[in-house]
Image (cartoon, helix red, strand yellow):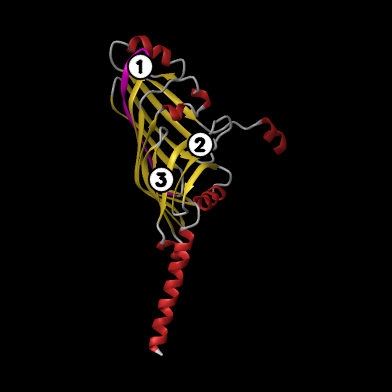
Amino acid sequence: MRRIGIAFLYIIAALLGIGVATVGALPASVTAAFAVESSNGQLALANVSGTAFNGRADATIRGFAPGQPPLTVRNIEWRISKWPLLLGTVVCSLQSKGPELDGAAELTRASGGVTARNVRIEFPAALISSRVPEASGWTTPGTVAVKADQLVATPSGLTGTVELNWRGAQTPDLGNIGEYRATLKGTDAGPVKVELTTMHGQVRLDGRGEFTFVNGLRMGVTIDIQGPSRDRLMPLLGLFGHRQPDGTVTVQINSKPPVRPAAVMKQS
């Protein structure tokens, strides 16, 4: 009887292995269709190739706010670990070497949410300003490096720390203006805390604020300029914010999308 039980376990393991291997042999379009459906219309994939477990595609992400253009990221490759699927967990390694994004991350999706580990990504800083309608005419040189060791997203909120480092920032009048770091800290419930600091440079930025998916980014930033151009440029910055007694300028940022007239009429 014991031998029959052991043989039965071997048969089940073999069947599971065959099932996993069969899924892995399916085309990458199967995984792509699942990802698109899970995004609720936020994601579209094109030029899909490979298999369900090892594939590549070009991804187009729809803008999150009205007037925000979509973002297309080319040459995204994924590798899905087979055996965690048996436990209902998807472990996926992502890598991109395209002109829009260069880096890698590991995503784990389970019933409780999504965990991102070892996130190391770089992209041109212009990708940010080109997707903010108010900054569409602003040329933004340099690169932004994103780092997160572990980030957990659940229905209740975001847990973890993300660092964004902007290197090579320039302006036509001042040339190289400095290097900056934005730190985002989430503690599950409540808004994500945002801090902006200047690592070095003649344009000093110091900001504190918070981010939620409902209200967007709300942040106050203090701006100062060091060097011979301070007396000439600080009055101009004062047109966009409030001059302080020490000569610095504070600017309030509120990225919440404006309420559309149609929505107001519908509510009323």
The quadrant where residue 262 appears: top right
Relative to 129, 206 lies left or right: left
* Dot placed on the residue nearer the N-terminal end, 1 or 2: 2
Q: Residue at x 68, y 30 (%)?
A: 261
The quadrant where residue 67 appears: top right
Mark 3: secondary structure: strand
Q: Residue at x 42, y 48 (%)?
A: 78
Near mark 3 (Cα within 10 A), the count class, few <14, some 14-19 or many ≥20, is many
Residue that numbered label 2 is attached to:
216
Distance, label 1 to label 3, CA atoms, is 33 Å
Residue 247, label in figure = 1
Residue that numbered label 3 is attached to:
186
Of badges 1 and 3, the one in the foreground is 3
In the image, 36 versus 183, the foreground residue is 36
The percent position of residue 210, horizontal first and vertical second, equals: 44, 38
Q: Residue at x 32, y 16 (%)?
A: 175
* Dot placed on the residue nearer the N-terminal end, 2 or 3: 3
The percent position of residue 256, horizontal first and vertical second, equals: 54, 33
- Magenta span: 171-188
Q: Amino acid at mark 3?
A: Gly
Near mark 1 (Cα within 10 A), the count class, few <14, some 14-19 or many ≥20, is some
Distance, label 2 to label 3, CA atoms, is 14 Å
